[in-house]
Image (cartoon, helix red, strand yellow):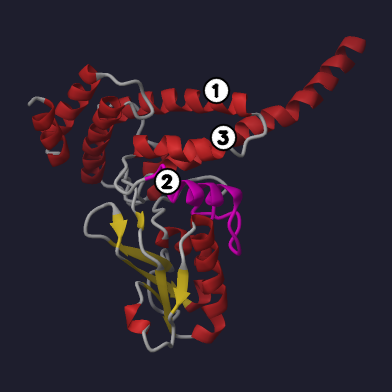
Amino acid sequence: MRRMCWGLFLAALLAPCIAKADEFDQGLSTLWEVLWHQSGTPTRIVRWENDLRVRIHGVDVATHREHTLQALRAVAAEAGVKLIDVTGQADENTANVNVEITGDNQLEDNQPCVTYLDFRTETRIDAATVQMRSRDAWRCAFHESMHVMGVRGHPAGQTVLSYFPWKIDGLLPLDKVMLRAWYSPRMRGGMTPFEALPVLADELVATAPHRAAAVQARDAFYASTVQQMHAYANGQGDIPSVVRRSGKSTSEGIRYGRGEMSYFLGIAYLEGATVQRDATQAVRWLERAATMGNRGAQAKLGAFRQ
């Protein structure tokens, strides 16, 4: 009886620690998935280098303006980016973030809000256009504001970016982690997923109550993720769940994604990003990407062999 009671007591003591560990691992998975586009392809980091000049227009603007601005101000403040509301001002034509509140019969039922990012190269955002149906603007505002900042993924997890959001009227802790990392001095526009992941993960580690355990969990996550991406890039194993869940991936898109992932693995091994530097592995993955038509890999190989 005493042994059973002691076992129950020990289990009760450990349960919060186990729950926190699971929560941290889920957070890492969410941060990895946010680096994937909803088309099912891994993406590079894009972000703003200028102030946000916001114009809100369309129907029912008076109803939705303040809540929309609240969302945009929240993400901009977390990222440390200045936001200026130019709606109705003499210089509103200088807006680089245009938010249109559309009629309820516009857009698609399965996509009541959408953000389009304009960038000449996949590094710096030049402009953003947001469309939200009037009846959905309240629940879409924070979700689309995250996209405006360049965070393009739709991960599972406790974030406003999830297809099934946990919260619609404010940012969640993971959203703040993403934005702080995305706009930290360590992050640069054009970074590959393996270059960006350590910046995101370290920001999450900084919030963990037990840092040493968090660092161990982070390193284990790196190792398992790299192995999964080896299999994915090689056309083996399961397609990543973030790709299956998007509902917008195609066989051609998956093939393209595998080519991109091969290139990103090559860069990771070349630069020692998330993995140890390994020139042999770098060349292997870059060659695979090059044979799949990846021009970046072809250029890297040419420079690497000179």
Question: Which residue is identified by label 1?
Answer: 216
Q: Report how far apart the C-alphas of labels 2 and 1 lie in the structure.
A: 24 Å
In the rendered structure, the answer to whether residue 107 lies left or right of residue 75 reads left
Question: Which residue is identified by label 3?
Answer: 205
Q: Which element is circle 2 on? A: loop
Q: Earlier in the sequence, mark 3 or mark 2?
A: 2
Q: Nearer the viewer, mark 3 or mark 2?
A: 2
Question: Which residue is identified by label 2?
Answer: 185
Q: Report how far apart the C-alphas of labels 3 and 2 lie in the structure.
A: 17 Å
Q: Which element is circle 1 on? A: helix
Give the position of the N terminus as an image quadrant: top right
Q: Report whether residue 1 is seen.
A: no
Q: Badge 3: few (under 14), some or many (20 or more) residues near its Cα, within 10 Å?
A: many
Q: Amino acid at mark 2?
A: Pro
In the rendered structure, the answer to whether residue 33 lies left or right of residue 269 reads right
Residue at point 37%, 83% (across, down):
92
Q: Earlier in the sequence, mark 3 or mark 1?
A: 3
User: Would residue 194 be counted in the magenta stretch?
Assistant: no
Residue at point 40%, 67% (across, down):
51
Residue 200 disc label: none
Picture coordinates of residue 133, whole percent (x, y) = 45, 75
Q: Main secondary structure of the magenta part?
A: loop
* Magenta region: 159-187
